[in-house]
Amino acid sequence: MRIGGAIERPYKSPEEWYQWVKELGYRAVLAPVDYRASKEEKQAYLQCVKQHDLVIGEVGAWKNSLALDDTQRHQAVEFCKNQLALADELSANCCVNITGSRGEIWDGFYQENYSKDTYALVVDSIRDIIDAVKPTRTFYTVESMPWMIPDSPDQYLQLIYDVDRKAFGVHLDFVNMINSPKRYLFCDAFIEECFTKLGPYIKSIHGKDVIMENAYTTLIHETMPGKGKVNYQQVARLCETLGPDATLFVEHLPDFESYKQASAYVREQAALAGVNTDS
């Protein structure tokens, strides 16, 4: 199991970047450049990754490929294609996006997110991105989400079946799918269900935590690992079933020190579970 996350510190070279990576204790990294970097810059970072036995777990796309505006949607899809090509060039575990939303907020909750027409557009856009790039060393994935496709393990399996492309994989964010009191209260069983059903397809994982308020109506908040209900010893054991190079990234934290604290906690829990994160 390899643990990584964001850095939240500036860097201008592979050497500066690696010093932050080393201080954070990461063995998995997010792509340090996007597709617009020069060939020389990409190769310099890739050489640094190889030299220090790191794994690039994710190349982020993070654009709304379902945007209502045709021009914006086209631009988003083209960006995803370029980022997928970068992931293939870097031999990253995956390129990751969300499926997108049918509203003004790119990751927002809208009734149309679940329409039949939107589902067809999701399938078509994923196929278009993959077919344009034809990756051989990476996978295109969509992050599981609370209020858009896919928001459950079974729905992700259906999406894999309908997309029908070997280069389509799973990006697992189990916290994003803990979107009801029942999933929160039985989150250990739900997380195990995610790994059991999606395991063969999982290319990278987000590691967060979740806490629910005892209030009307339901309020479920994302929080730092160790500050909520998720059992990270269980998560570490489940990650280990995917192989020693499975990547888990802590995310959505405000600064460098928070990433340092969160990744240290996940490493500590993994050690208590007997899972190696150091080699």
Image: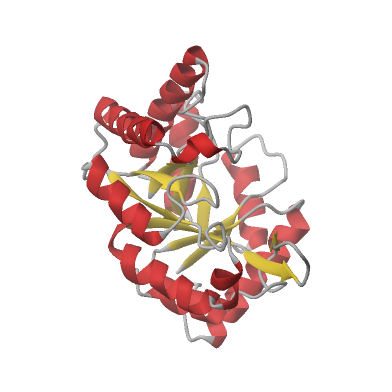
Place residue 149 in its image quadrant. top left
Front residue of this view, candidates 272 and 206: 206
Residue 274 at x, y = what percent?
A: 48, 86
- 199 in relation to 131, above or below: below
Identified at 42% across, 45% down, the residue is: 142
Residue 45 at x, y = what percent?
A: 49, 40
Front residue of this view, candidates 5 and 147: 147
Q: Is residue 73 left or right of residue 93?
A: right
Residue 191 at x, y = what percent?
A: 47, 71
Identify the residue at the far top of this view.
Answer: 71
Identified at 43% across, 31% down, the residue is: 83
Front residue of this view, candidates 243 and 169: 169
Identified at 32% across, 67% down, the residue is: 197
Place residue 141 in its image quadrant. top left
Place residue 15 in its image quadrant. top right
Residue 19 at x, y = what percent?
A: 65, 52
- 227 in relation to 219, above or below: below
Q: Is residue 217 left or right of residue 21?
A: right
**Is any part of residue 144 visible from this angle?**
yes
Identified at 50% across, 80% down, the residue is: 234
For the C terminus, the image quarter is bottom left
- 161 in relation to 239, above or below: above
**Is any part of residue 244 visible from this angle?**
no
- 82 in relation to 31, above or below: above
Front residue of this view, candidates 239 and 218: 218
For the N terminus, the image quarter is bottom left
Give the image's coloring scheme. secondary structure
Q: Is residue 85 left or right of residue 58?
A: left
Instruction: Count how many numbered circles sit on residues in the image.
Output: 0
